[in-house]
Every structure is written in structure tokens, then in C-alpha cells.
């Protein structure tokens, strides 16, 4: 379900809101719980800005800015960008750095922990949320404190431990002073900059250089792409946090007992969901008989289970996963194998989202491809041409504004047009309601890279 073009944070795994939307709501909800907070600051990949903006629009949440990374460089450069942006205001605010792909079910407990952490971080300390463990989990990193951590208490962090084996995890659970590393950090912007400059000056300097050469377009802030590509990839934990206990930086832990999960495996998703009397969690069109302890996501068709226990079944229009829940970490091996084989499934769903809407690849064969295309109200595709393919468009809903060569005209429902190879054209939606068309491509080369753009309102590369 998570693809490069549509990653986990934008999926709705536990209800009607995506994990990103839930994270944004948690942050904006802090204001109501007594934390003086600015609008959220979003750091995301350039390729995902329209997904973030659309999901924020759906929730009615306004953001301060969107910092758009031209490439993924992990979380340490991302937090450095956020800190540099925050310091531009002339103040030194406390940053609550939250991954957007985690689940927290008890928002009141989260708000209480944030209040405690913000007060501590204002004293120039770095605070990490330690999740109170309820099982010997081997998929998480652990934090060791100098004493058992209680609710509403702050303790010194002694060390970090990466994912332990089962025996070690069981020992940690019984010790009382080990906690899951939530990946949520609270600290002043200046403290982060001092820490990253101390432990990873190469990351700090390269990020500063990319920031100095940034471009600004409304709420969109884009670091310089060439400079950003030189930044070493590193996480917040590896770059800074694991080095803090033996340094002059004061690292503290606050207990977080708020139904936290990073939903890193399907087994974790199953634990977080409501279940029926047989411990099944089913979404979509699912029919089950004599089956227990199953998780099923049916995205596009009927899924039937008969006599199946302890299984994960994930159905999407272009792929189906069937797995044993205890082998959730091994799903990565399948994704890597698909990537090595040059398959497109790890990159995109059959339905591909774009800034102007989406397209769904309905069918393909020898020298033809059929797509269903939705264009958002008042949106338009780029002015473009294709060297190798022709396109036949049929309007099935709404009104289409067609630019074809020197002509511009409207098409209504049930009307169609033809775009020959090499012809400059544009598809636009002039109305306040969505436009849907069926596109039939024909030709001897139908890949998505057969496109020459001449004008694009979304800032994509043009010729």
C-alpha cells in the first residue's frame, strides 16, 4: 500500500484520516490544551507537496510553510532545515519534531507529555519521548534512563539501544528503565543547530549552504537542489541523539503512554485496529468464514477467507500481499526484489496522484493503454507534446477545455477529441466541479517519460 509516489504517511490505515492528517491535528490541537504553538511547519519531499497540501486542505489546517526537499536525505537534514527556518523569525522557538507516519490514540496524554517536554526544552535541554513498553518488542529502538520512568516525570537518558533480540527485549521489559524510542524530539532550534554542528558539522554546513540558496514561492520553500544532494544521509538518532549521553548536551526523557505505534509492520497495524469476536480486522469488501486473527484490506474487489488463521491479506488493484504476521519485517525483501527487477509496483499505485488530480491505468496491451483521468476544479495539465503516441479523449463527467495546436475549445460529456503524435496540447478543467475523461493512448512507445513540457503551472521542468 505504501509506494514511493504515495508513502505510508498519506495512507488511511485506521479510519477516515491519513496518518499525516492525524499528526497535523495533534499538533494544532496542542493550542487548545494550553501549549502556545505556531502553525505547523511541514518538511516533505518535493514529489509529495501536492499530497500534503491536499490533505491539509481536507482537514482545514493552515501551515506556516512547506519545506520541500529535492531528495530524501533522512531526518537529520530535515530537522536542520526546520531549525534554520524557525531561527529566521529572529526568535529561538522550541521545536516539537514529530514524524508524520506514527499513530497516537490518546491525544490528551500526548498533549500532557508535550507540555512537560516544552517546559524542559526551554531550559536548553533535549527531550525525547520514551514510550512505555507493553511487550518485548524487537522492531523498536530502546532508550535507557537512570531510573524507572513514571508519568509526569523527567529523567536523564543514559544510552540508546538499537533493535534487540527477543531475549534482550524481554530483559528490558522487566528492568523498568528501558523505553521504546518514539522518534519524537522536543528542543530549541538553537540547541539542535549547536548539536548537529558539534556531532555532524558536515551535515550542518551542507544544509546551511542549501538553505542560503533556497527559493521561496508563497508557502513553498525549496533548498537548492544541487547543494542539497551533497548532504550526507543520516537520521536524528544516529547523527546526534546517540552521542548526547556522553556529551555536554543534556538529554532527558519524558514518558509517553498514549497508544503510540509507528505502524512499521502489518502486525502493528492489526494491534492498533478494532477487531471482531474472532480477532479479525477487516476493511473493504471482505467475507470470512471460520477465520481468526486476520487482517484484510480489500481496496478494489471482494476478498474471501475460509478457514484462515493468523494471516495478513492486503489487496490493491495491482498487487496482493499474503503474509504471516510474525514475518512482517521480511516484506522489505519483496519490495527490494521488485525494485531490483525494475518493476514499477514499488514506485506507484495503479492510480497515480498528480498536482492537478490523478490518473488510473485501467488497461494496457500491445501498442495501447487506457487511463481514467480526473482533473481537479480550475486545474490544468502542462502544455505538452508526445513524440511517439497519439491520445484519444472522451469526456465522461464535467467540461474539458482543450488546447490543440492553435485551437482552444470546450468538450462536454460524451464528446471526444484526438491528439496526434507531436501535436502541442493541454487538458484543463475550467469549471468548479471535477472533470473526468477516458484516455486511450496508441503508439509504439507509451511510457510516461514520452512527454515534452512547454509550460507548467506547478513548476515542473519544461523545455
Image (cartoon, grey):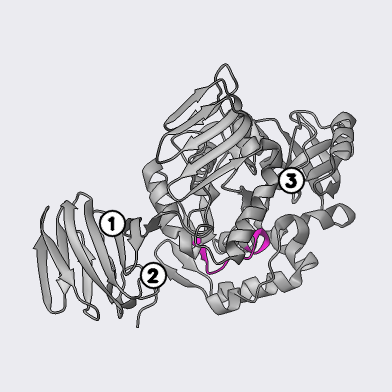
**309 is higher (above) or lower (below) than 225:** above
Q: Is residue 142 left or right of residue 285?
A: right
**Residue at 65%, 36% in the rendered image:** 267
- Pick the residue in front: 93 or 85: 85
Q: Which residue is mark 1?
A: 373
Indicate the position of residue 334 as horizontal and vertical percent values. Answer: 63, 54
Answer few, some or many: residues within 10 Å of disc 1's Cα (few below 14, many 20 plus, some between 14 and 19). Answer: many
**Residue at 55%, 25% in the rendered image:** 274
Indicate the position of residue 227 as horizontal and vertical percent values. Answer: 59, 78
- In the rendered image, residue 453 lying in the magenta stretch gets the answer no
**55 is higher (above) or lower (below) than 381:** above
Indicate the position of residue 220 as horizontal and vertical percent values. Answer: 44, 63
Q: Which residue is mark 3?
A: 127
Total tally of numbered discs in the picture: 3
The image quadrant where one finds the C terminus is: bottom left
Q: Which residue is mark 2?
A: 448
Indicate the position of residue 179 as horizontal and vertical percent values. Answer: 79, 37
**428 is higher (above) or lower (below) than 420:** above
Q: Is residue 286 visible?
A: yes
**Residue at 58%, 60% in the rendered image:** 338
Q: From mark 2 to mark 1, how far is it between C-alphas?
A: 14 Å
Q: Is residue 362 left or right of residue 176?
A: left
Amino acid at each position: 500500500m505504501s509506494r514511493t509516489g504515495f508513502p505510508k504517511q498519506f495512507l488511511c490505515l485506521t479510519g477516515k484520516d491519513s496518518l499525516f492528517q492525524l499528526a497535523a491535528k495533534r499538533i494544532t490541537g496542542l493550542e487548545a490544551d494550553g501549549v502556545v504553538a505556531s502553525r505547523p511547519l511541514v518538511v516533505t519531499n518535493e514529489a509529495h507537496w501536492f499530497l500534503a497540501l491536499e490533505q491539509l486542505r481536507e482537514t482545514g489546517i493552515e501551515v506556516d510553510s512547506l519545506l520541500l526537499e529535492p531528495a530524501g536525505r533522512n531526518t537529520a537534514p530535515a530537522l536542520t532545515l526546520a531549525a534554520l527556518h524557525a531561527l529566521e523569525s529572529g526568535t529561538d522557538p522550541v521545536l516539537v519534531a514529530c514524524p508524520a507516519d506514527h499513530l497516537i490514540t490518546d491525544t490528551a496524554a500526548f498533549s500532557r507529555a508535550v507540555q512537560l517536554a516544552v517546559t524542559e526544552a526551554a531550559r536548553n535541554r533535549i527531550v525525547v519521548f520514551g514510550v512505555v513498553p507493553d511487550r518485548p518488542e524487537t522492531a523498536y529502538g530502546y532508550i535507557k534512563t537512570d531510573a524507572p520512568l513514571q508519568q509526569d516525570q523527567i529523567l536523564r537518558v543514559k544510552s540508546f539501544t538499537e533493535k534487540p533480540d527477543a531475549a534482550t527485549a524481554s530483559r528490558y521489559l522487566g528492568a523498568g528503565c528501558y523505553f521504546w524510542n518514539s522518534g519524537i524530539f522536543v528542543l530549541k532550534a538553537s540547541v539542535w543547530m549547536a548539536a548537529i554542528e558539534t556531532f555532524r558539522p558536515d551535515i550542518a554546513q551542507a544544509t546551511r549552504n542549501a538553505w542560503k540558496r533556497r527559493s521561496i514561492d508563497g508557502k513553498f520553500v525549496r533548498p537548492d537542489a544541487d547543494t542539497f544532494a551533497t548532504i550526507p544521509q543520516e537520521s536524528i538518532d544516529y547523527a546526534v541523539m546517540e552521542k548526547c549521553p556522553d556529551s555536554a548536551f543534556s538529554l532527558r526523557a519524558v514518558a509517553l503512554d498514549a497508544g503510540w505505534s509507528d505502524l512499521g509492520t502489518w502486525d502493528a497495524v492489526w494491534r492498533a485496529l478494532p477487531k471482531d469476536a474472532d480477532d479479525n480486522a477487516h476493511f473493504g469488501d471482505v467475507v470470512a468464514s471460520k477465520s481468526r486473527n486476520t487482517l484484510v484490506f480489500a481496496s478494489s474487489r471482494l476478498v474471501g477467507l475460509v478457514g484462515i488463521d493468523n494471516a495478513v491479506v492486503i489487496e490493491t488493484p495491482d498487487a496482493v500481499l499474503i503474509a504471516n504476521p510474525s514475518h512482517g519485517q521480511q516484506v522489505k525483501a519483496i519490495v527490494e526484489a521488485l525494485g531490483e527487477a525494475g518493476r514499477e509496483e514499488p514506485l506507484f499505485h495503479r492510480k497515480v496522484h498528480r498536482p492537478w488530480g490523478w490518473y488510473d491505468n485501467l488497461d494496457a496491451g500491445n501498442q495501447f493503454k487506457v487511463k481514467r483521468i480526473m482533473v481537479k476544479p480550475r486545474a490544468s495539465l502542462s502544455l505538452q507534446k508526445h513524440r511517439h503516441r497519439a491520445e484519444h479523449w472522451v469526456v465522461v463527467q464535467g467540461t474539458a477545455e482543450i488546447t490543440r495546436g492553435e485551437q482552444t475549445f470546450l468538450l462536454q460529456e460524451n464528446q471526444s477529441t484526438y491528439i496526434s503524435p507531436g501535436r502541442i496540447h493541454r487538458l484543463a478543467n475550467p469549471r468548479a466541479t471535477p472533470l473526468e475523461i477516458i484516455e486511450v493512448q496508441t503508439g509504439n512507445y507509451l511510457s510516461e517519460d514520452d512527454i515534452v513540457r512547454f509550460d507548467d503551472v506547478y513548476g515542473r521542468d519544461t523545455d
